[in-house]
Image: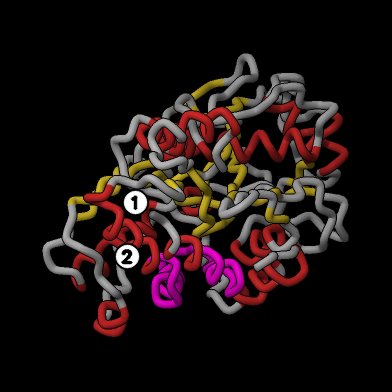
């Protein structure tokens, strides 16, 4: 089935609007988020609909952004499938992909699609002519949090953010910031810009946005590792959020749940639309609705339009993928991998995301994902 931007992805906006407006992309695990809710969704109805695979000790790792969703999925699956063991380690997208390419996990969670060289490396792990493929599962916004007492409703645009995180704008009362916030009482204090110290899909998506929407002001190639000079760093989204929370004049990027949990104000982004856009699940859904499927074959990597000017579309948005072999999976874990991922992509699996702050997959994409999972060998 061929997916198009108009038919396959636009339905996400409709599906996500039905989700509570309080929904925000959550993350925890090693990235502990005290504001996250405990796993839920382990209802008897969900358990009854799960088709169990063979009993196996299934190891997986990667994205911290999907950890709360994984808590729900793992809890429900293991309750329904007695004897099955699923261990998902929230090591971060970079570490998760590395472990998958080393053959030590059945699948990986990543906030970035596989790069060409990673696809090539996967061919040595995926036997019988197979390779790693990207299966989108969840999406949501990346917030830019700040600590600037007395300043509410801060508005920034892509060029200004690029210059801030590249240390080219160093003071809060810089003319570029003043122009976007004419009524704000901006201090003359220094900007303390924080980025991730570890390899991160959040960093990859943040820098993709800067490169996609402000190419003339962001000269770096991007990736999971931070490339710009200067600035300050902290490990994991929890570390960046903590530094922003406690440091006057700070600014940093992390999943929206961290801002919500710690009461950190977030930047509204001027995209050129009729009004600046705040980070929210609905606004992220409108962004994803403008995406294109660019993967070939069974790969479902998406390309987001970071320069979007669509009203209400929040451009700093990520999609988390499960990465698995299309062919040549390990025989001892293949059946369990297919059964678990089929549940994850099922209607019940996606409905379980609502209380955890994620936007469920649109129907057409979920159908394609389930078909691809069923074909894994």
Towards the viewer: 251 or 172: 251
In the picture, which quadrant includes the N terminus? bottom right
Relative to residue 128, is residue 308 depicted above or below? below
Residue 34: give its label: 1
Q: Nearer the viewer, mark 2 or mark 1?
A: 2
Horizontal placement of 336 versus 113: left or right? Answer: left
Image coordinates of residue 340 in percent, x first then y, are 32, 62
Residue placed furthest toward the front: 128
Q: Is residue 349 magenta?
A: yes
In the picture, which quadrant includes the C terminus? bottom left
Towards the viewer: 308 or 110: 110
Residue 363: give its label: none
Relative to residue 222, is residue 72 depicted above or below? below
Dot 1 falls on a residue whose secondary structure is: loop
Residue placed furthest toward the top: 229
Tell me what residue is drawn at x 76 percent, y 26 percent: 218
Among the 4 quarters of the image, the one containing residue 290: bottom right
Horizontal placement of 312 versus 354: left or right? Answer: right
Q: Circle 1: is it few (<14), some (14-19), or many (20+) Cα within 10 Å?
A: few
Image coordinates of residue 273 in percent, x first then y, are 86, 57
Image coordinates of residue 307 in percent, x first then y, are 81, 46
Dot 2 falls on a residue whose secondary structure is: helix
The main secondary structure of the magenta stretch is helix
Q: Which residue is mark 2?
A: 339
Q: Is residue 213 magenta?
A: no
Q: Is residue 154 visible?
A: yes
Tell me what residue is drawn at x 45 percent, y 47 percent: 323
Q: Please, which colouring scheme is shown?
A: secondary structure
Q: Which residues are magenta?
A: 344-369
């Amino acid at each position: 089935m061929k997916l198009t931007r108009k038919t396959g992805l636009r339905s996400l906006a409709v599906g996500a609007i039905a989700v509570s407006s309080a929904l925000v992309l959550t993350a925890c695990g090693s990235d502990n988020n005290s504001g996250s809710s405990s796993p839920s969704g382990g209802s008897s109805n969900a358990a009854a609909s799960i088709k169990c695979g063979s009993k196996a000790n299934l190891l997986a790792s990667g994205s911290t952004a999907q950890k709360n969703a994984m808590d729900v999925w793992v809890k429900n699956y293991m309750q329904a499938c007695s004897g099955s063991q699923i261990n998902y380690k929230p090591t971060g997208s970079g570490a998760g992909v590395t472990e998958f390419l080393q053959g030590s996990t059945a699948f990986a969670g990543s906030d970035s699609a596989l790069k060409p060289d990673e696809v090539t490396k996967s061919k040595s792990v995926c036997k019988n002519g197979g390779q790693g493929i990207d299966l989108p599962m969840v999406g949501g916004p990346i917030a830019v949090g700040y600590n600037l007492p007395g300043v509410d409703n801060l508005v920034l645009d892509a060029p200004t953010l690029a210059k801030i995180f590249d240390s080219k704008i160093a003071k809060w009362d810089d003319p570029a910031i003043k122009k976007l916030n004419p009524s704000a009482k901006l201090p003359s204090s220094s900007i303390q810009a924080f980025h991730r110290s570890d390899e991160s899909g959040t960093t990859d998506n943040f820098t993709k946005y800067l490169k996609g929407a402000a190419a003339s002001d962001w000269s770096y190639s991007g990736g999971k590792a931070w490339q710009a000079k200067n600035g300050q760093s902290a490990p994991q989204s929890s570390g960046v959020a903590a530094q922003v929370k406690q440091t006057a004049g700070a600014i940093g990027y992390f999943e929206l749940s961290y801002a919500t949990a710690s009461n950190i104000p977030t930047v509204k982004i001027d995209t050129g639309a009729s009004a600046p856009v705040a980070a929210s699940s609905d606004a992220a859904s409108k962004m994803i609705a403008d995406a294109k499927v660019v993967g070939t074959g069974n790969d479902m990597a998406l390309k987001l339009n970071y320069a979007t000017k669509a009203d209400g579309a929040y451009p700093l948005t990520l999609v988390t993928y499960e990465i698995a072999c299309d062919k040549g999976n390990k025989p001892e874990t293949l059946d369990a991998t297919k059964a678990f991922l089929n549940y994850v992509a099922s209607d019940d699996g996606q409905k379980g995301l609502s209380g955890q702050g994620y936007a469920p997959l649109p129907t057409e994409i979920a159908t394609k994902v389930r078909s691809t999972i069923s074909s894994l060998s």
